[in-house]
Image (cartoon, rainbow, N blue to C red):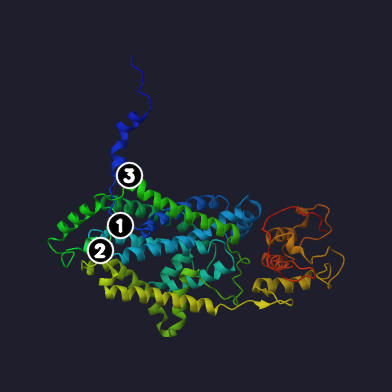
Amino acid sequence: MTSAPRPGSGWWQRRLDIASLRRSMLDREMPSGLTWWHTLGSATLTVFLLQAVTGAVLAMYYAPSPDHAYESIRYLEGQVHLGRVLRGVHNWGASAMVVLALLHMVRVFSFGAYKYPREANWVVGVGLLGLVMAFGFTGYLLPWDQRAYWATQVGTSIAGTVPGVGGAVAVLLRGGTQLGAETLTRFYALHVLWLPAAIIGLIGLHLVMIVRQGIAAPPRVLEEAAPARTDADDYAAHYDKTVGRAKRGGPRFWPDIIAKDAVVSLLTVAVIVGLAMVEGAPLEAPADPTDTSYVPLPEWYFLPFYQLLKLVPGSMESTVAVGIPAFLALTLLGLPFFDRSSRRHLRGRPLALAGLVAVLGGSALLLGAALGEIAPPSESPSGVALSSVERAGRATFQRQCAGCHVVGDEGGEEGPELTDIGTRHGSAWLHSFIENPQRFHPESEMSSFGPPTLSHQEIEEVARYLTTLRGPRGQTLPMAIADTFPEPSTPVR
C-alpha cells in the first residue's frame, strides 16, 4: 500500500503549474527607459487594496440606517481602538485613489500608451476611473452628517436633470422622491457590493491585458522609423520588432520593476496613514433635512464640475450637467480609435497637448474659484475663527449651560469650570457625557441633556464648541489633543 503524496512544491506544481505562472507573471523582460511615472498604476492598485481592507473593517461597525449611521461613526471614532485613524485612512485613501488614477491616465495619455495594441486596455482604464468616482460619490453619504446629506441632495438632483430619464434616475438613486432610509441603504449596497464587484472584475481584466501586452516602451523608441499611422499594414510588424529590441538588456519585472513599485506604494501608504493620524476624517453635525440654510459642497474632486454648473445660465444647467460628462466620457472612450497617428510623444501631438492643458488648467481654475468662494468662518470674541457648527454650539451653551458653568469670568458656579475643557477632552467624549453623564460617573449631579432636552445635533454643536475652549480665560485656541475617550481626571458633576 503506497502512502498519499505530501503536499509540497511538487504537489502544487502538478496541479497549478506554478513554474509557468511565475514565468508569465514575474520573469518578464521590460523595455529599457521606464521611469518612476510608470509606478503610478501599481500605487493605485495598492491604495485600492488598502481601501478594500479598511472598508471591510469599517463595515463591521457601520449601521446603514438614518437612525444609527451617524452614531455608529461616532462610536467607531470615540470607542474603537484606532477607529479614528482607520476612518481617516479610508477617507484619505479615497482622495489618493482619485489623484493616482487621474495621474496614471495623464501619464498614459502623455506617452501615447493608449494606442496600438492597448486600445482595449485604455477603454477598461476609463471604466475604472468612472468606478473610482462612483465610489467617492456613494461613500460620501454614508456618515449621514450635514455635509454628506446636502451634498448628496445636490448630486442626485443633478442626476435628475438627464433629459427623458432624469426623474427615474433620481428616484432610483434615492429610493423615492426624497433622501431617506432607502437612499442610505442603496448607496451602502452600491458602495460595498455592486461597485467592488465591478471594479475587481475590471482590475482583473486590466492586469491580464498588461501581462499579455507588457508595459509600453518609451515614446521615442516606438516613434523611431515608424509608419505614419498605427492602422498601417506594416505597423504591427514594426511595433513587435521595436519592442523586442527595446527589451534586450532591459530590466526584469522581478525584481527591478517591482522594487520601484514597492517604494512608491509604501511611500503613498505612509502619506495616507500620516494624514489620517494628524487630520482624521471630517464629521459634521448629524444630518438635518429641515436645515435649508446649510450650504452644500461636494468632495473636492467634484468641485470643478460643481463650480462650472454655477457659472452657466439656469436654462442651460441640465444641458451642461449631462453634456459635459457625456462628452468627456465618449471622447476618452473613442480616443484610441480616432487617434491613429503613430506619434506618441506630446511634442509631436500639438492638439493632444492643447486639450490636456485646457482640461487640467480649466479644472484647476474652477477648483480654485470654488475653494475661494467657500466662506471663511466668523470670528469668536477672542478673535479665533469658529465654524458654523461651533457658533451654533456657543449659542446653545449660553442658553442651556452658562447658568451652571463658568467660562472665563462669566457663568454660574453650580457646576465645574469649563474655561479650558478643550485641553482635556475631545468632542466625542463631550458629546457622550452631555448626552448621559451617569454613563461616566454614576454619582454625577448633572442631568442628562440627551433627547428630548437637546437633539443629537445640538449636543454635537455644543461639544464642538467646548473643544475650542483651551485658554486661561476661555479663549478658543487650536486643538492639541486627539479626540479620544479618556476617563476624566476629576469628576464632572
Q: Residue at x 31, y 32 (%)?
A: 13
Classify residue 178 as left or right of residue 11: right
Discs 3/2, front: 2
Report if residue 93 is visible in the image: yes
What's the amino acid at mark 1? Answer: Gly
Dot label at residue 114: none
Discs 3/1, front: 1
- According to the picture, the residue beneath numbered tag 1 turns out to be 33
Residue 49: where, in percent of width, then height? 45, 51
Classify residue 334 as left or right of residue 159: left
Circle 2 packing at 10 Å, graded few (<14), some (14-19), many (20+), is few
What's the amino acid at mark 2? Answer: Arg
- Quadrant placement of the N terminus: top left
Q: CA distance from mark 3 to mark 1?
A: 19 Å
3 or 1: tag closer to the N-terminus: 3
Residue 129: where, in percent of width, then height? 38, 62
Q: Nearer the viewer, residue 72 or 186?
A: 72
What's the amino acid at mark 3? Answer: Leu
Residue 21: where, in percent of width, then height? 30, 41
- According to the picture, the residue beneath numbered tag 2 turns out to be 220
Q: CA distance from mark 3 to mark 2?
A: 26 Å
CB contact under 8 Å: marks 2 and 1: yes
- According to the picture, the residue beneath numbered tag 3 turns out to be 26
